[in-house]
Amino acid sequence: MLRRRCLFGLPSFEHASLRVPLTRNIRRASTQPKPQPTVTSTSTTPNTRPHSRFLPSSPRLSLTYSFTKYFLASAILLHIFFEYFFVLELAWGISMLPTIASANDWVLISKLYRRGRNLHVGDVVSFKHPDKMGEYAVKRIVGLPGDFVVEGSPGKGGSSRMMQVPVGHCWVIGDNLTWSRDSRTFGALPLALVTGKVVRVFSFRQGWRKLNHGLQPACAESDAVD
């Protein structure tokens, strides 16, 4: 059935069955509750700290963590000190008598002179032995690159031939010439093998003592007393 309606003075027709669903939909929409906005609440409790899985959760674990941290830091600092600054080593052998005793003498080695930095003739140095793998030796420098040295032992029946120390090498000799295996045996020592310079010697009987230069100028036999 059509019913006639007047809208703004113009005739219009509307079926009666079409109004019922529209009215019902409007009523249903009006009766549904409106969604409330969600509000996120934040905690205002003071002195709260987020939990981290990297931090210990008990006092015992905290103590272990602190001990491990300080132990590793100390180990790293000691390694750096002994590797790049100073190290105290026990010396043995008779090749450096009488400067260094054959036993019970400790030598303080400065690593600031490693690889031949700022070395001079007469210095006592520590180096990796070129013939014995894993061993170290202590000798005195008698020649630097460009210097002329005697290959053998003067006045000991050895070779008196002169040679020039090559670049990047040095010539080392033990103070006890008779019982020393040095450059007279293995030749010029590469400066890259030098691990440091001996600056002090310590013994429980004499305490700390400084090393002397050790070298004396050679005297010709004609200069002797008539």
Image: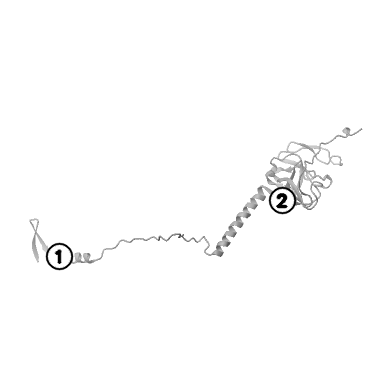
Query: Between marks 1 and 2, how big is the CA–CA gap?
Result: 106 Å
Q: Quadrant of the N terminus?
A: bottom left
**Image position, residue 134 (x, y; %):** 72, 52
Image quadrant assignment for residue 197? top right
Horizontally, residue 74 falls left or right of residue 144, namely left
Q: Residue at x 60, y 56 (%)?
A: 72
Screen quadrant of the C terminus = top right
Neighbourhood count class around disc 1 (C-alpha, 10 Å): few under 14, some 14–19, many 20 upward: few
> Measured from the top left, where is residue 55 in percent x and y?
52, 60
**Mark 1 or 2 closer to N-term?**
1
In the rendered structure, which amino acid carries the disc numbered 2? Leu
Amino acid carrying label 1: it is Arg
> Which residue in the protein does label 1 denote?
19
SS state under label 2: strand
Q: Which is in the foreground here, disc 1 or disc 2? A: 2
**Numbered tag placed on residue 55 in the rendering:** none
Q: Position of residue 79 (x, y in %)?
A: 65, 52
For the residue pair 218 and 128, the one nearer the viewer reads as 218
Q: Residue 112 or 180: which is nearer the viewer?
A: 112
Indicate the secondary structure of the residue bearing disc 1: helix
- In this rendering, the answer to whether 30 lies above or below 160 is below
> How many circles with numbers are drawn on the protein?
2
| Nearest the eye: 61 or 48 | 48
Q: Quadrant of residue 173?
A: top right
Q: Which residue is mark 2?
A: 88
The image's colouring method is one colour
Q: Is residue 35 left or right of residue 86?
A: left
* Crowd rating for badge 2 (residues with CA inside 10 Å; few <14, some 14–19, many 20+): some
Relative image position of residue 106 (x, y in whole percent): 75, 51
Q: Furthest residue to the right?
A: 226
Point 67% across, 47% down: residue = 85
